[in-house]
Amino acid sequence: MNIHEYQAKEVLRSFGVPVPQGFAATTIEEAAEAAGKLPGPVYVVKAQIHAGGRGKGRFKELSTDAKGGVRLAKSFVDIRADAAEMLGNTLVTLQTGPAGKQVNRIYVEEGSEIEKEFYLSLLIDRVTSRVSFVVSTEGGMDIEQVAHDTPEKIVTFSIDPATGIMPHHGRAVAKALRLDGDLAKQAQALVESLYTAFTANDMEMLEINPLIVSKDGKLRCLDAKVGFDSNALARHPDIAALRDETEEDAKEIEASKYDLSYVTLDGNIGCMVNGAGLAMATMDIIKFYGAEPANFLDVGGGATAEKVAAAFKIITADPNVKGILVNIFGGIMRCDVIAEGVVTAVKEVGLKVPLVVRLEGTNVELGKQILKQSGLNVIPADDLDDAAQKIVNSVGGLN
């Protein structure tokens, strides 16, 4: 689960992490009131969406040369103008895709005089099963580009969970950022606070870009991007309460209610599969034959007919879907349950696009019989290759 920058900074502030003072606003008047609580004379107005690259983004409703989603303001007039241009409009960044995201709230923050910019993040290293720090002197830049062009400027190290954070980890960060004296001491305190915040809240990712040295010699986290392990939210009701469903895909929200693993993609062939590996293989073979999957959907090994019906409805709710491929290999999952779920859903919502079904495994003959006797216009397939070719051909995309 992701949260907004202003929420991330509140979480970090509660752990003693140095962040600039700021206030969220959903109206122009609230933005002006927020500025009145800050020292000034320079303010930063930031669009709050779950996507990076806001500063380089553009608003669909504004001219192409208009300012992006992060702006400096030097007066209340500027703040009102920026708020008027941001709130309710659609911000497009590299991470949102061309559709962009509507800005429903902004963050008005005190300005900072920047001496240096750095990059610092904490991530879960899946190889070592440890929390890892990623540090670079190239703050404020695309870290992926830095990793590609100048990998020597990125320093990484992991924390042994048996010891937790230690003083030498803070020194390692200070050395990587070429900090000494009081700034090195600040770096050590910052590292301890960030690690504590990360582990205490079951975070998956914590990115500070940029981490700055201000002209008065202070380390400050100028931006913060935080993601949490959704499986651990039951332990953190305060964090779960920060969820903003307006920033999430409606189909993914609906899927989460049925414990379905669903991710919206940009293609036109809807997929319903059991098992993440088989789902990936299904998506790959669709692409191999010249089309694009509209989603990743794993119904799981123990799905009920109700769960399958819900999954089918979610797929058909996507206006981009021009055809549907159901690919089930029944082990724990029974093919007759899949068939019953599909029939139930189709009878309720109708079938307006081609449907190819490939069933194999437990109760496969019974599943095929259920589909055949349903009277639905289902295209049967013998195997995955046959199924992929039939659905791609049905939507006119076969190579």
Image (spheres, rainbow, N blue to C red):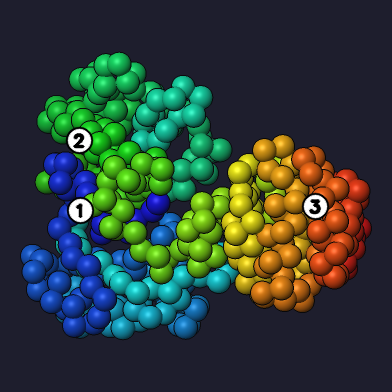
Disc 3: which residue: 367
Q: Position of residue 382 (x, y in %)?
A: 91, 48
* Residue with the mark numbered 2: 193
Q: CA distance from mark 2 to mark 1?
A: 13 Å
Q: Position of residue 208 (x, y in %)?
A: 32, 45
Q: Where residue 350 sits: x, y (%)?
A: 72, 76
245 to the left or right of 282: left
Q: Secondary structure at mark 1?
A: helix
The one nearer the camera, 102 or 281, is: 281
Discs 1, 3 touching: Cβ within 8 Å: no
Quadrant of residue 317 in the image?
bottom right
Spatial CA distance of label 2 from label 3 is 56 Å
Looking at the image, which residue is at 56% across and 38% down? Answer: 148
Task: Tell me the SS state at disc 3.
Answer: helix
Query: Do the CB atoms of the residues marked 2 and 3 lie less than 8 Å apart?
Result: no
Q: Is residue 112 left or right of residue 324?
A: left
- Specify the amino acid type for callout 3: Gly
Visible residue check, residue 214: no
Give the mark nearest the N terminus, 1 or 3.
1
What residue is shown at x 75% (from left), y 57% (from top)?
A: 339
Real-space CA distance between mark 1 and mark 3, rounded to the nearest whole angstrom: 53 Å
Chain-order first, disc 2 or disc 1: 1
Residue 173 seen in the figure: yes
Q: Which residue is mark 1?
A: 10
